[in-house]
């Protein structure tokens, strides 16, 4: 495993009382104050996250679009500058090697993934570059995320710009205090969200400017403990928990990561076979349980005395005030309303995902 990337702001966060920890290959704040309060700030107003557990690289060269189009599950050729997509990189057996976001800029494609996956993705790409005019370049950029119904006005006040209406994965480049930055619309919590990509020197300026507006926008700096409960409520799968090299794309329900009309790519035959068959044997589902504490990942799920699946992520939901879990279940046990029990004997019920979905964008 690659060494964890330490946030350029790690020492500053620690001096402000934050607890640091490793998360998806980055050393970032786990919490600043109470994770439940941080969670509710995102649901009700806005939270600010240090997302240095993400990592970026550029794909350049005349063949970049054709090459990447054949490497990932979604449609790269249709991207115009300023647009982006979510995609997966599969092996020949259709299993997920990594998930990634792809953004089209004027002369390059930008790849954003977990810090502990970037080397893996780049090494895999390099194995397939033969006569292609393609080059890969790691980028020394770090992401700060504004998440919540008041994310956009806080972002505008922080950067002193008007943020245009953007679709999810839409992006543009601008400057802040002399530093080039890229603004990306992306939700990692189920709320309206934006990321600011900036170099190490510019991070503190953006972070400090946003925190300076905190009282006006009811903003809290937030850590990964809150991010986990937010993303579980929003049913956003993560690599290493819901996604991995034993997972098929359609088992995880990643319809937004695949194009069924783009033509050939690595693993496409397996994806198409699963789609034409009309089902997969395992399915990512939601579980609501009466367990007082969140069950551990790997907890087995039992139906009529038979093991039918296991939990991947779970939390006590601050928004819903229930214990919820993401889990893989066998197809025959995956219908919403199915009642089963955890290995501990505590009852649970299969529910429709997502657990939480915003109904409006508020300012």
Image (spheres, rainbow, N blue to C red):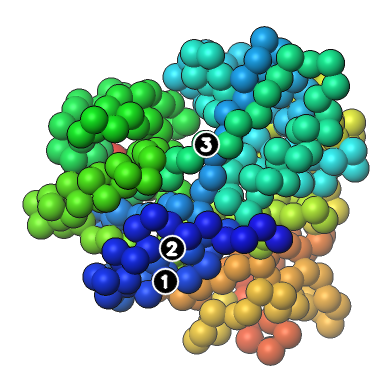
In front of the other: label 3 or label 2?
Answer: 3
Q: Residue furthest bottom?
A: 344
Choose the circle earlier in sequence order: 1 or 3: 1
Residue 255 higher or lower than 60, as above or below: below
Question: To which residue does mark 2 refer?
Answer: 28
Residue 13 higher or lower than 295, as above or below: above
Q: CA distance from mark 1 to mark 3?
A: 24 Å
Classify mark 2: helix, strand or loop: strand
Q: Which residue shows up at 66% across the image and 74% down it? A: 297
Choose the circle earlier in sequence order: 3 or 2: 2
Compared across the picture, whether 61 is left or right of 9 comes to right
Which of these two is toward me, 97 or 297?
A: 97
Q: Identify the mark at residue 90; answer none if there is no mark.
A: none
Residue 188 higher or lower than 66, as above or below: below
**Quarter of the rendering containing residue 299:** bottom right
Question: To which residue does mark 3 refer?
Answer: 139
Choose the circle earlier in sequence order: 2 or 1: 1
Compared across the picture, whether 52 is left or right of 245 comes to left
Do the CB atoms of the residues marked 2 and 1 lie less than 8 Å apart?
yes
Classify mark 3: helix, strand or loop: strand
Q: Identify the mark at residue 20; answer none if there is no mark.
A: 1
**From where the camera sits, is residue 340 visible?**
no
* 10 Å crowding of disc 2: few (<14), some (14-19), many (20+): many
**Quarter of the rendering containing residue 334:** bottom right
Which quarter of the image is occupied by the N terminus? Answer: bottom right
Q: Residue 13: x, y in percent?
A: 31, 65
Q: Residue 52: x, y in percent?
A: 45, 52
């Amino acid at each position: 495993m690659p060494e964890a990337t330490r946030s350029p702001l790690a020492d500053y966060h620690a001096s402000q009382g934050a607890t640091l920890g490793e998360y998806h290959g980055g050393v970032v704040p786990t919490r600043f104050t109470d994770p439940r309060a941080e969670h509710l700030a995102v649901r009700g107003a806005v939270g600010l996250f240090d997302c240095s557990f993400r990592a970026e690289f550029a794909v350049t060269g005349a063949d970049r679009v054709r090459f990447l189009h054949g490497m990932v599950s979604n449609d790269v050729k249709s991207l115009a500058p300023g647009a982006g997509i979510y995609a997966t990189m599969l092996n020949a057996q259709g299993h997920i090697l990594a998930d990634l976001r792809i953004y089209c800029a004027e002369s390059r494609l930008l790849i954003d993934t977990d810090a502990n996956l970037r080397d893996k993705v780049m090494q895999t790409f390099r194995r397939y570059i033969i006569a292609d005019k393609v080059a890969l370049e790691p980028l020394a950029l770090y992401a700060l995320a504004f998440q919540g119904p008041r994310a956009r006005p806080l972002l505008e006040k922080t950067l002193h710009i008007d943020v245009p209406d953007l679709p999810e994965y839409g992006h543009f480049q601008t400057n802040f205090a002399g530093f080039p930055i890229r603004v990306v619309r992306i939700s990692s919590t189920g709320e309206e969200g934006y990321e600011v990509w900036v170099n190490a020197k510019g991070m503190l300026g953006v972070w400090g400017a946003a925190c300076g507006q905190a009282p006006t926008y009811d903003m809290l700096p937030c850590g990964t403990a809150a991010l986990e409960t937010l993303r579980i409520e929003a049913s956003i799968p993560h690599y290493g928990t819901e996604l991995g090299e034993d997972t098929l794309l359609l088992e995880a329900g990643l319809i937004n990561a695949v194009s069924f009309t783009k033509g050939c790519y690595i693993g496409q035959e397996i994806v198409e076979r699963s789609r034409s068959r009309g089902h997969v044997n395992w399915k990512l589902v939601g579980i609501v349980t009466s367990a007082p504490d969140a069950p551990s990942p790997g907890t087995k799920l039992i139906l009529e005395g038979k093991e039918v699946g296991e939990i991947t992520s779970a939390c006590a939901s601050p928004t819903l005030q229930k214990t919820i879990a993401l889990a893989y279940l066998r197809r025959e046990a995956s219908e919403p309303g199915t009642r089963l029990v955890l290995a501990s004997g505590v009852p649970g019920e299969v529910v429709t995902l997502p657990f939480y979905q915003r109904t409006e964008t508020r300012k």
